[in-house]
Image (cartoon, rainbow, N blue to C red):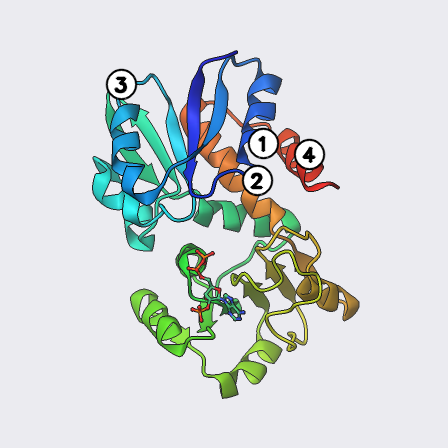
Amino acid sequence: MYPTRAYLFAHPAKHSLSPTMHNTALEHLGIAAQYEAKDVAPQDLQANLEALRTSGAWGVNLSIPHKETVLEFLDSITPEARAIGAVNTIVVKHNKLKGLNTDAPGFMQSLREAGLTEFADLEVVILGAGGAARGIVYALQQAEARVQIHNRTWKRAEVLATDFDAQALTDSDLRQAIKNCDLLVNTTSVGLENPNETPTIFLPKQGWVCDIVYKPLETKLLRDARATGLHSIDGLGMLVHQGALALEHWIGQPAPIEIMRSAAMKKLGY
Ligand code: ATR
């Protein structure tokens, strides 16, 4: 058994695709190390982070429910992760813990590889205002897209829009805003594990629809989009790229992206 050099801290942790993706990548690269998912309850997060300092580990990925609460336990945080308010990757160096966010650049990578490369003045509607939406709104704003946010709970959309100088959409504005946008992004969990559920029945007249859900890969939203001739982007790209970027920070060399993608697809049953 190789020594564990990287972890996922999550609660629950057992359904994650990250161990498969990272271990397949490490094996492919001939690096004698392994990545392990660890179920860490909220009250145990700090102790687990402290133990990392001298453990010889390269770092950790964080998932639900730790991405926001972890900030106070770190020695440094990149400006991007600070602005987003969430850390999904920690790098351990000289016994210090540095927090990064690879979800936001991973999301942008997934759009680019699908062929969406111009963001200045792109009209975007985001569905949802949770943790995942924050990184996505930040990344799109940085790329100079024009972002509007709709959420089931209006107050959360309003808070997120205010934080990032974006626009919050009311229920009655949603139809028109989606029709006229160039890119619609679902960041809600609607459609997760349910192929008949969609977060909205409205679709853009032209352009792109992205769903960050990857289980199933083709959600109803993406099926509807494809049926009307729109470009669609599923959630696997974001998953793979956030993982690849984290791995690159840890090992200091390019991650085998296609190997990681195939490993994740296989685990998903495709
Ligand atoms: P994450 O970190 O994955 O974004 P989250 O912070 O719990 O998770 O946010 C989940 C998002 O999905 C929220 O925008 C949530 O809407 P509310 O703020 O109104 O709760 C949205 N969501 C979850 N289930 C939903 C549903 N059935 N219909 C509409 N929106 C839903």
Look at the numbered disc 4 and give the secondary structure of its residue.
helix
Work out how far the residue at label 2 is from the one at label 3, CA to CA, in angstroms. 29 Å
- Looking at the rendered image, the disc whose residue lies closer to the viewer, 4 or 3, is 3
Mark 3 neighbour class, 10 Å CA radius: few under 14, some 14 to 19, many 20 or more: few
Q: Where is residue 21 in the image (x, y as percent from the top left)?
A: 58, 31
Residue hosting label 1: 21
Tag shown at residue 262: 4
**Res 17 quadrant in image:** top right
Q: Which residue is drawn at 66% across and 60% down?
A: 194
- Label 2 sits on what residue type? Val
Label 4, residues with CA under 10 Å away: few <14, some 14-19, many ≥20: some
Q: Earlier in the sequence, mark 4 or mark 3?
A: 3
Residue 223 shows up from this direction: yes
The vertical placement of 131 against 14, above or below, is below
Q: Name the residue under label 3.
A: 54
Secondary structure type for disc 2: helix
Picture residue at 60% right of the left edge, 33% below the top: 257
Q: How far apart are marks 2 and 1 (CA)?
A: 8 Å
- Badge 2 vs badge 1, beta-carbon distance below 8 Å: yes
According to the picture, the residue beneath numbered tag 2 turns out to be 240
Q: Which circle's residue, 2 or 1, is located before the other in the chain?
A: 1
